[in-house]
Amino acid sequence: MSDCVAIVSGGMDSVTLLYYLVKVKQRQPAVISFKYGQKHVKEVALASEHVRLLGLTDHLVCDLSPMRELFKTSALVSSDLHVPTIEQVQGDSQPITYVPNRNMIFLSLAAAYAESHDANEVFYGAQRHDLYGYWDTTLDFLERLNHVYNLNRKTPIRIEAPFVTYSKGDILRQGFAIGVDYGKTWSCYEGSTTACGICPTCAERLAAFQEIGVPDPIPYQSN
């Protein structure tokens, strides 16, 4: 029986979180993933694979793609906007890769999913962005959101982000220690067969692997 909910996209942060919950914390999470009109859903398929590999049974994939109009100002969703390079977003407090209110929406739905499982914890893979960042992955956001969810009169939900102060390198160290196969994760914002190697999330991922001295197992166009 599931005892918490984990939001898992299939990227390196959320997959590491899932393994951390199961292998380190001995939890039995119900997993929730989202299709929201992003340019590819490769990550979602990988999330399903890790759910299977860990022997979990509850995995809800929410198709929010009919709501993509809500997110049309994001380069992750709009076909009219090009995904920028890391150099183009550095120093921008709200880069074009930001998806409007995405984490708030996802966490709201995950909280409802938790209530339906009589669980009171929702985990998501927010982490410390070293090269760029979003307001809805910060410790301040997490703390304020928990004040709101504590108003629930029957099942107060606690939003947990164990990696919120971790760098990508810290997450990789944790993941390798517990057997995460990063060849079965995807971070690139583009939807090509191989990762672009230059978008913001590719840049952070590559820097993290370089930091710990391990080659990234996924293929890159620039390799």
Image (tube, grey):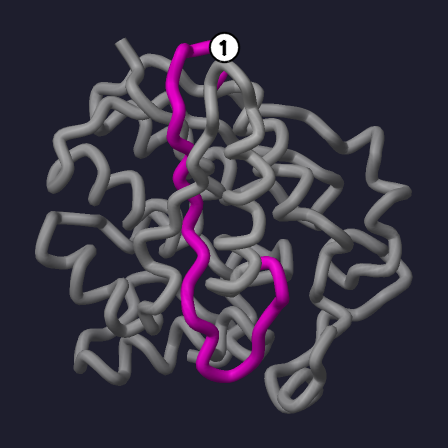
Residue occupying image coordinates x 49% and y 54%: 143
Magenta stretch: includes residue 117: yes
Amino acid under disc 1: Ser
Magenta stretch: includes residue 48: no
**Would you say 12 lies left or right of 55 here?**
right
- Quadrant assignment for the C terminus: bottom left
Considering only vertical position in the picture, is 202 above or below 154? below
Considering only vertical position in the picture, is 197 above or below 218? below
The image quadrant of residue 67 is top right
Residue occupying image coordinates x 61% and y 68%: 134
* Mark 1, other Cα within 10 Å: few <14 / some 14–19 / many ≥20: few
Residue on which the image places disc 1 = 116
Residue occupying image coordinates x 43% and y 20%: 59
Residue occupying image coordinates x 50% and y 53%: 142
Number of labels in the image equals 1
Bounds of the magenta span? 115-136
